[in-house]
Amino acid sequence: MDWKVSGLTLEQKIGQMFICGFDALTPNDHAKKLIQDYHVGGIVYFRRNVQKLSQLSELSSSLQDLAASSGGPPLIVAIDQEGGMVARIDHEGISRIPGNMALGATGSKEYTYQVGKIGAKELRALGINMNFAPCLDVNNNPMNPVIGVRSFGEDPQAVAVHGVAAIKGYQEEGVSATAKHFPGHGDTSVDSHLGLASVPHERARLDQVELYPFKKAIEDEVDAIMTAHVSFPAIEPDDGIPATLSHAVLTGLLREEMRFQGLIITDCLEMHAIAKEFGIPEGAIRSIEAGADCVLVSHTLKDQEAAIRAVADAVRSGRISEDRIDASVERILTLKARNAHTVRNLPAVDFASLSQEAKGLLSEIAGKGITLVRDHDQLPLNQDESVLVYWPELLRATQVDEAWSRSFTLGDALNGRSGRIEEIRIGTDLSDEEVDAAVQEAGRFKQVVVATYTSESRLPEGQRKLVEKLLQLDGVKLIVASTRNPYDLNDLPNIPTYLCCYENTPYYMDALAGVLYGEVKPEGRLPVSLSDKYLSGSKA
């Protein structure tokens, strides 16, 4: 059916502007209410919706059937499948594509393009037609607690080149890309999940750094842009107003000045920067007044219902004009019409075969991305001697961390090359007692590898103490490999050998094992500066 704005009721039009989530593996009462009663235009998946690939494909088809039987347009089905450390799907059969910073370290836009195509083929086969990726944030703040390795790096031009390549890869395969987080979340030290951050720079600096990758994405006709819950005083004079709720940012800058014609999607309004400061219903109204086309409320039915009803009341009271609603719904229906082929008759895909085809390329990319920052004659390891590996495990989920459905450690990768491997699994932070117990184990070894893991801005104190105590042992060859945040070196200035992997995913741990034994040459270059000595673009 050729859907027209004029053929929809006010309730249907408002519903089309919401993208919502629910907690189930099949369409439960929550999902049915969203689609049948509130006519929502989109569904967002999280890890809670995924058990296996066949189940997820069936879920997508069932949701689209619900929308069709309710007399509504097809759904946008979205997900945050950025790659690397942010992947809602890592289940058997899916390709574990690398994240942005790992790709940035390769310096190859062709790799980024090919990774986008791999990811999009698999998403489309699962009935997912929009990816909330790529991040175009320029990560020039080492203390950023939420972006970090989700960024391609600190150079705006490199971020733009890789971002455009990713967008091209996704959209050529029929999956809408979503550039985020506009106007830029890279130079912040506050996680907008937890509070309101600000980027206080002058407009000229914003043009050169934060806005530049988005400008290039718009020129390349990215389908959607997601907003940041971050204030930009140089654009919005009220520095307490985040970009998501700012007419000056969304309409004045993005829509009018930068001439973006695609969908403007809010980041989730349940994040504290909106929910605590403004409330979700008021946030929904103000985001639409600012110029947003799609309002994202990811989790709670009560909040979703309140937001949808608040917008309907605002239209009926005259606070929001129906013309304003119509303009957004027109953009939404236009995108849905263009991507209609991705929501029905899903392509039959042999995921095992597709994943196998991608394996060689993804292994190659990992070797090209791992960066040797410093080595004082510690590499390669001696394969005839035992190796002790410390492997940090995530014991508590956070806003930026999720436990993987499958575990593959550095010890697993090294065991494939030598049987003389012992691995100690530790928490991402350790008590003093746990540090002492862990160090005692090292007395039996002459070769020790510590994999560090930092999900936020600073290496956890327990990991720092562990490395510092290991440094005091005589006759021990000590190697540290950061498996997420490259800035860990700043908290470990005395380590003799330091490698950056940017993620702890299987391809990268296998490549790291190859580097440690001299089988793989680490060819990556730092996409961010660690200090005046270790600048962006450098390697050992």
Image (cartoon, helix red, strand yellow):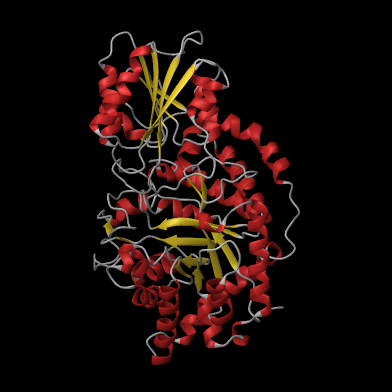
Q: Is residue 238 visible?
A: yes
312, 114: nearer the viewer: 312
Residue 210, horizontal then vertical, whole percent: 37, 51
Residue 196 shown left or right of residue 259 in the figure: left
Residue at x 42% of width, y 82% of height: 311
**Relative to 57, is 454 above or below?**
above
Residue at x 57% of width, y 41% of height: 96
**Relative to 254, is 355 above or below?**
above
Residue 9, horizontal then vertical, whole percent: 57, 88
- The mark total stands at 0
The quadrant of the image that shows the C terminus is top left
Residue 272 shown left or right of residue 52 in the figure: left
Q: Quadrant of residue 413?
A: top right
Residue 534, horizontal then vertical, whole percent: 33, 27
Q: Quadrant of residue 111?
A: top right
* Residue at the extreme bottom: 317
**Relative to 436, is 254 above or below?**
below
Q: Quadrant of residue 336?
A: bottom right
Residue at x 46% of width, y 50% of height: 135
511, 365: nearer the viewer: 511
Residue 425, horizontal then vertical, whole percent: 41, 31
Q: Is residue 126 visible?
A: no
**Relative to 294, is 472 above or below?**
above
